[in-house]
Amino acid sequence: MNTAKDTILKVDNLKLQFSSNGQTLNALNGISFSIRRGETFGFVGESGCGKSTTSRAILRLLADNAKITDGTIYYNETDLLKLSEKDLRKIRGKEIGMIFQDPMTALNPVLTIRKQIFEQLRDTKLSSKEKEIVAIEIMNKVGIPLPEKRLNEYIFQYSGGMRQRAMIAITLAGNPKLLIADEPTTALDVTIQDQIIKLLNHVKEDFGVSILLITHDLGVVGRMCDRVAVMYAGYIVEMADTYTLFSAPRHPYTKGLMDALPKLPQEQTRNEEMKPIPGALPSLSDLPQGCPFVSRCQLHQTLCQDQLPTMQEISPGHFARCHYFHKLEGCTGLINCTKG
Amino acid sequence: MSDKAQNILIKIQNLHKSFPLSRSLTDFVLRRPSKAVKAVDGISLDIFENETLALVGESGCGKSSFARTIINLYKPDSGDIIFKGNNLASLDKANLKTAKRECQMIFQDPYSSLNPRMSIGDMLHEELLYHHICSKKEAQTKINELLDMVNLNKDTAERFPSEFSGGQRQRIGIARALAVNPKFLIADEAVSALDISIQAQILHLLQSLQRSHGLTILFISHDLRVVHYIADRVAVMYLGKIIELGTTDQVYTSPLHPYTKILLDSLPSVDPRKKSSVPAIEGNLPSPIDIPPGCRFSTRCPNAKPHCFNDEPGFYKVNDDHSCACHEYIA
């Protein structure tokens, strides 16, 4: 459907295992997705579902006990999994930048912000005067006041929201084409979160980057993403554009997440009670043979216990991994479903 | 839920708590006065029996300090906390122990608030005997009852905190808090670290326990969705003071204070068609060491008038049960 030209990243059947204490944890069990140029693609799911692992696997920023057992990751025409460590370094930070949840641990505490931006500009052959101009311009663009002064400061001298801006500035200095944002607003207060969401949306247009957003917050997805993949126990269970996903989810887990989210008054289109999803995540070392969601699913039948459902295209661009997706109908009550 | 009998369980009057900062040598030489973080800066509040009162605000606004000062985990600097006819602020040690037993707390991170080297059974056993809740003989039955109440298996008692998931640990934290039959429960960000599906389970549990045990809950959270779901009344805090107080419906559907309005507006909506509607609030929370003069929100307020920078607003009653600290609402 998409030509290779408008796809920036294509991940196909990615499988990854962690070995720990003699156990094998199946963290990713065949992840396939692609990100188009200029779009924000979101990964949502609960802790331990593999969303961060996926993003780290793209840049091979993995712990020693992790092993990619299958799959391909194409960035433009390059298979990142086949690259040598040396060639991969030309991609990391330059082609694909990453921003993390906690700038205090992600940035270097003993270097000034200037040094960290200059480090990103190392290969550009700019004079230090030109680098200074570029650095100030980037600081301005991410909304850090008094950039001339603040470039000389260290990350601990910044407040929470400003730290996140500084990290975005440093990442953008590498001029990446793809930005991986791993829970970029999770540690922030709502008022500051709002500022950072607006900044990232703005940066996307301004710098022409694509964003891979990892979050557990459905609200952040609604504000930022064009398309979303929902992950559960190392599988993508549903994938669609944001509006379709929120208005008509076709996987019981996605529906369950939305039912479990406490609603705001303006979102209560119908008088529905908040419903928890019973049970807990299955252990990654002992995944069921059939559908990973079977033990918590309201729709499950014998078929679900025996056979892992495949990703089925329900409508153009809307995929779900459920045998009985047709039983899920109607809207979530989260947003008004009357198309308009 | 609003037609409950409105008996006051805890009456808090003009409570203050500040944490002094150490003075540097230069401050000493230059004779600068020592500074302090004013975490609770004059709060008066009535908490009614059987209600769930939510305390919301940004990090660093003093929510947790306020809650801890109420139950004397921090000694208040001044002010009164009247709980069942006793003033907790001036109670002697022996009576304070009894009073504290009736006020229990559950925390955000149940892992760091459980002893990693004690099995769940031992932990509950110790607590039951220390507070003379039951005899040694009855303890085991009581422990089973408690675990059953929070929907955990009996074999939980022999296991250690590291063997449980986050949601299960939070259930253990709740069982521990309820072991001593408290009247008043403080839930400090009790569901913030949990995933959405588990969070909903714990919220349901808290609600049903509130009904069965006649609990009064002070629910501290920064998550406005959760608060809307669980709270009867909401108090909004900003820099050590309550700036708006009302029933959940009033606060969410007709917020009065500009800060509350911004807080509610900045909550991301899941509807992708609603792209950002309001301008983002400028700047960060000012430091609680140097609280701005006049209205403490004036530095970030979009409608600040000249007098807002000089005169501190009172706490005005706008209509039944709904009050607000903003000059706009002077009666």
Image (cartoon, coloured by chain):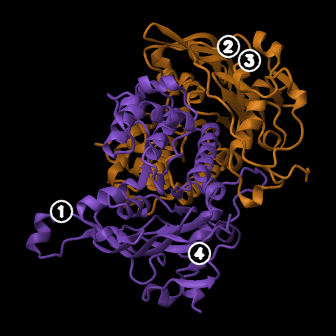
**Residue A337 left/right relative to B223:** right
- A177 above or below A30? below
| Quarter the N terminus of chain B occupies | bottom right
Picture coordinates of residue A109, whole percent (x, y): 31, 43
Relative image position of residue A295 (x, y in whole percent): 70, 22
* Residue at x 57% of width, y 28% of height: A55
Q: Which residue is mark 3?
A: A291
Q: CA distance from mark 4 to mark 1?
A: 35 Å
Q: Residues within 10 Å of mark 1 (few under 14, many from 20)?
A: few
In the picture as drawn, the residue positioned furthest to the top comes out as: A22
- Look at discs 3 and 4 and give the one toward the viewer: 3
Specify the label residue A288 is tagged with: 2
- In contact (CB < 8 Å): disc 3 and disc 2: yes
Assign a secondary structure to mark 3: loop
Q: Depth check: A319 or A273 in front?
A: A273
Number of marks: 4
What's the CA distance linking mark 1 and mark 3?
A: 58 Å
Mark 4, residue position: B258
Relative vertical location of residue B162 with respect to residue A305 in this rendering, above or below: below
**Which residue sits at x=71%, y=63%?**
B277
Check chain identity for marks 3 and 2: say if they share one.
yes
- Marks 3/4: CA–CA distance: 49 Å
Earlier residue among tags 4 and 1: 1
